Amino acid sequence: MNARGQKERDALRTNVRVRSVSTSNVDRASSYIRHIILDGTLKPGMSVSDTFICKRLGISRTPIREALRRLELEGLILHVPHRGWAVQTLEVADIVEIFEIKECFESVMVRQAATNLTRGTKAKLISAVAKMEEAAKSEDRDAFVTADDMFHSTLYHAARNDRIKQILSSVNAQWRWIRVGYIGLLGTMTQAVDEHRAVLECLLAGDHDGAVSATVRNVFRVKQNLLCILNNLAMPFVTTLERRSTPYAPKRPRAYRHPRKER
């Protein structure tokens, strides 16, 4: 092997390693930012500081900015001109769009899952509904959300459609904050248990059309309840006054600072 050929191979290996590290850092930053948004550390309207994330993760700004652009495509954050990045808020119109997407894709997902139910899948669905019922009786909101996620993730897996799973996961992340607050309202968990049990019973009976209809009823009912609440009570983390013609821009986004450890 001549010297020139060796240099070309060394350069190729270096480029591959650089791209691998860069991609890994983008994934790492994306996961971290997504986590602190979904767990409520960063609330809607708060600014997302790339400087803070650089220091927190110990990586450069380039992969962090790429991660922020990725999360913007997921609908979790928004770039405000001359002000930086902020956690996305929702308008009533956004809720309508989210649930139109959910109704469409969850119908397809349930129908596809219905044709691929194994004994193990059925057992997981039965267990998820039982855990939802138990959480509803004890009014344990966190346990209910976990069981609900288990029910739907089991259906995603059974549907064997990665694109639908990706779309629904992204859409559901956009309204997660509202979902957590909504589930805590009186009677909501009990009603959701009844509707999920209806989907389950249709799936176990081999009634594909019935399972789809039950899913659509659940999505429609949640959407209507949310719209009623938002239009009348205006939850604090939903923007109802600004219209789509005016991009959301908080007057002064509040920067998130990680709490200092007590000495």
Image: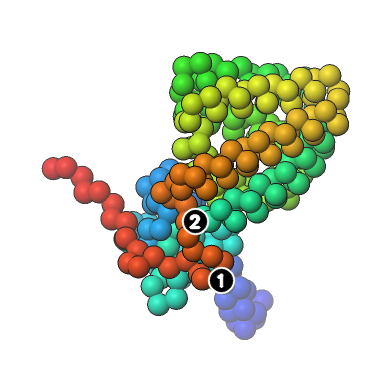
Disc number placed over residue 240 in the picture, else none: 2
Foreground pick, 219 / 72: 219
Q: Is residue 158 above or below residue 263?
A: above
Instruction: Tell me, yes or no, if residue 37 can be seen here.
Output: no
Q: Is residue 186 left or right of residue 60?
A: right
What is the three-letter code of the residue carrying label 1? Ser
Which is more toward the observer, 53 or 244? 244
Q: Residue at x 80, y 23 (%)?
A: 202
Q: Residue at x 69, y 39 (%)?
A: 220
Separation of residues labelled 2 and 1 (CA atoms): 13 Å
Residue 154 in sight: yes
Crowdedness near tag 1: few (<14), some (14–19) or many (≥20) residues, C-alpha within 10 Å: few
Depth order, front residue of 164/103: 103
Residue 76 screen position, x and y as percent:
52, 56
Q: Is residue 21 above or below residue 128?
A: below
Q: Quadrant of residue 134?
A: top right
**Which quadrant, please, contains the N terminus?**
bottom right
Left or right relative to 262: residue 132: right
- Which mark, residue 158? none
Asked if disc 2 and disc 1 are in contact, CB closer than 8 Å, the reply is no
Q: Amino acid at mark 2?
A: Thr
Give SS at disc 2: loop
The residue pinned by badge 1 equals 245
Nearer the observer, 192 or 43: 192
Percent x, y for residue 35? 46, 47
Q: How busy is the neighbourhood of tag 2: few (under 14 within 10 Å), some, or many (20 plus)?
A: some
